[in-house]
Image: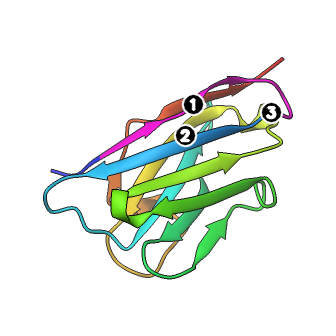
Amino acid sequence: QVQLVESGGGLVQPGGSLRLSCVASGRTFSSYAMGWFRQAPGKEREFVAAIIWGGDIRLYADSVKGRFTISRDSAKKMVFLQMNSLKSEDTAVYYCAAKNLPPVRTDRNDYNYWGQGTQVTVSS
Protein backbone atom coordinates (compact mmCIF):
# COMPACT_ATOMS: atom_id res chain seq x y z
CA GLN A 1 0.00 0.00 0.00
CA VAL A 2 1.43 3.35 -1.10
CA GLN A 3 0.60 6.42 0.94
CA LEU A 4 1.23 10.05 0.17
CA VAL A 5 0.66 12.55 2.96
CA GLU A 6 0.72 16.30 2.41
CA SER A 7 1.25 18.98 5.02
CA GLY A 8 2.02 22.67 5.29
CA GLY A 9 -1.16 24.24 4.02
CA GLY A 10 -2.89 27.12 5.76
CA LEU A 11 -4.10 30.68 5.54
CA VAL A 12 -1.70 33.30 4.21
CA GLN A 13 -2.01 36.88 3.05
CA PRO A 14 -1.46 37.86 -0.58
CA GLY A 15 2.26 38.21 -1.24
CA GLY A 16 3.09 35.71 1.46
CA SER A 17 4.77 32.32 1.32
CA LEU A 18 4.05 28.73 2.25
CA ARG A 19 6.01 25.51 1.96
CA LEU A 20 4.12 22.30 1.29
CA SER A 21 5.58 18.90 2.07
CA CYS A 22 4.68 15.43 0.85
CA VAL A 23 6.05 12.22 2.31
CA ALA A 24 5.74 8.91 0.51
CA SER A 25 5.57 5.60 2.31
CA GLY A 26 4.79 2.00 1.59
CA ARG A 27 6.84 -1.13 1.51
CA THR A 28 6.94 -1.31 -2.27
CA PHE A 29 6.91 2.39 -3.06
CA SER A 30 8.89 3.20 -6.16
CA SER A 31 8.07 5.92 -8.60
CA TYR A 32 9.65 7.88 -11.42
CA ALA A 33 8.21 11.30 -10.78
CA MET A 34 6.24 13.29 -8.25
CA GLY A 35 3.80 16.04 -8.98
CA TRP A 36 1.80 18.73 -7.27
CA PHE A 37 -1.72 19.49 -8.46
CA ARG A 38 -4.39 21.80 -7.13
CA GLN A 39 -8.14 22.06 -7.26
CA ALA A 40 -10.13 25.19 -6.55
CA PRO A 41 -13.88 25.06 -5.79
CA GLY A 42 -15.87 24.44 -8.94
CA LYS A 43 -12.78 23.87 -11.06
CA GLU A 44 -10.93 20.86 -12.39
CA ARG A 45 -7.78 19.60 -10.78
CA GLU A 46 -4.83 21.24 -12.50
CA PHE A 47 -1.12 20.64 -12.77
CA VAL A 48 1.21 22.83 -10.72
CA ALA A 49 4.69 21.29 -10.79
CA ALA A 50 6.52 17.99 -11.18
CA ILE A 51 9.99 16.59 -10.51
CA ILE A 52 11.74 13.30 -11.16
CA TRP A 53 13.51 11.37 -8.42
CA GLY A 54 16.70 10.85 -10.41
CA GLY A 55 17.98 13.72 -12.48
CA ASP A 56 17.20 17.40 -12.75
CA ILE A 57 13.93 17.59 -14.63
CA ARG A 58 11.35 19.98 -13.25
CA LEU A 59 8.13 21.13 -14.87
CA TYR A 60 5.95 24.07 -13.88
CA ALA A 61 2.59 25.42 -14.90
CA ASP A 62 2.88 28.84 -16.53
CA SER A 63 0.74 30.34 -13.78
CA VAL A 64 3.33 29.52 -11.09
CA LYS A 65 6.64 29.88 -12.93
CA GLY A 66 9.01 32.18 -11.08
CA ARG A 67 6.93 31.97 -7.89
CA PHE A 68 6.84 28.28 -6.97
CA THR A 69 9.76 25.87 -6.64
CA ILE A 70 9.53 22.10 -6.44
CA SER A 71 12.29 20.12 -4.75
CA ARG A 72 12.89 16.68 -3.28
CA ASP A 73 14.74 14.75 -0.61
CA SER A 74 15.18 11.32 -2.13
CA ALA A 75 16.57 9.73 1.02
CA LYS A 76 13.47 10.72 2.97
CA LYS A 77 11.08 10.16 0.05
CA MET A 78 9.83 13.70 0.42
CA VAL A 79 8.81 16.33 -2.09
CA PHE A 80 8.35 20.00 -1.34
CA LEU A 81 6.60 22.94 -2.96
CA GLN A 82 7.88 26.35 -1.97
CA MET A 83 5.24 28.91 -2.84
CA ASN A 84 6.17 32.59 -2.84
CA SER A 85 4.33 35.75 -3.87
CA LEU A 86 1.04 33.99 -3.32
CA LYS A 87 -2.09 35.35 -4.96
CA SER A 88 -5.76 34.87 -4.17
CA GLU A 89 -6.07 32.73 -7.29
CA ASP A 90 -3.64 30.23 -5.75
CA THR A 91 -6.33 29.31 -3.23
CA ALA A 92 -7.07 25.60 -3.65
CA VAL A 93 -6.60 22.16 -2.20
CA TYR A 94 -3.10 21.04 -3.13
CA TYR A 95 -2.45 17.37 -3.88
CA CYS A 96 0.74 15.38 -4.08
CA ALA A 97 0.86 12.61 -6.69
CA ALA A 98 3.25 9.89 -7.81
CA LYS A 99 3.83 8.63 -11.33
CA ASN A 100 5.30 5.17 -11.71
CA LEU A 101 6.88 5.30 -15.15
CA PRO A 102 8.56 7.84 -17.41
CA PRO A 103 8.15 10.31 -18.93
CA VAL A 104 7.16 13.02 -16.51
CA ARG A 105 3.87 14.59 -17.57
CA THR A 106 1.42 17.29 -16.60
CA ASP A 107 -1.78 15.27 -17.13
CA ARG A 108 -3.35 14.21 -13.85
CA ASN A 109 -4.60 11.00 -15.48
CA ASP A 110 -1.00 9.81 -15.84
CA TYR A 111 -0.40 9.73 -12.07
CA ASN A 112 -0.89 6.52 -10.14
CA TYR A 113 -1.12 7.55 -6.48
CA TRP A 114 -2.59 10.56 -4.73
CA GLY A 115 -2.55 12.11 -1.31
CA GLN A 116 -5.58 13.48 0.50
CA GLY A 117 -4.67 17.10 -0.10
CA THR A 118 -3.91 20.15 1.99
CA GLN A 119 -5.86 23.40 1.89
CA VAL A 120 -4.11 26.61 0.89
CA THR A 121 -6.08 29.82 1.33
CA VAL A 122 -4.67 33.16 0.22
CA SER A 123 -6.71 35.99 1.63
CA SER A 124 -6.35 39.26 3.47
Instruction: State which tag comes first along the sequence, 3 or 1.
Output: 1
- Which span of residues is magenta-colored? 4-15
Compared across the picture, whether 63 is left or right of 50 comes to right
Residue 86 on image: x %, y %: 79, 38
Which residue is the extreme one toward the top?
A: 124
Callout in the foreground (3, 2): 3
Q: Amino acid at mark 3?
A: Gly
Callout in the foreground (1, 2): 1
Q: Secondary structure at mark 3?
A: loop
Q: Amino acid at mark 1?
A: Gly
Q: Which residue is mark 3?
A: 16
Instruction: State which tag comes first along the sequence, 1 or 2.
Output: 1
Q: Which residue is mark 1?
A: 9
Task: Find out whether residue 23 is within the magenta segment.
Answer: no
Crowding at dot 3, Cα within 10 Å, few <14 / some 14-19 / many 20+, comes out as some
Compared across the picture, whether 102 is left or right of 47 comes to left
Q: Residue at x 42, y 61 (%)?
A: 109
Which residue is the extreme one toward the front?
A: 75
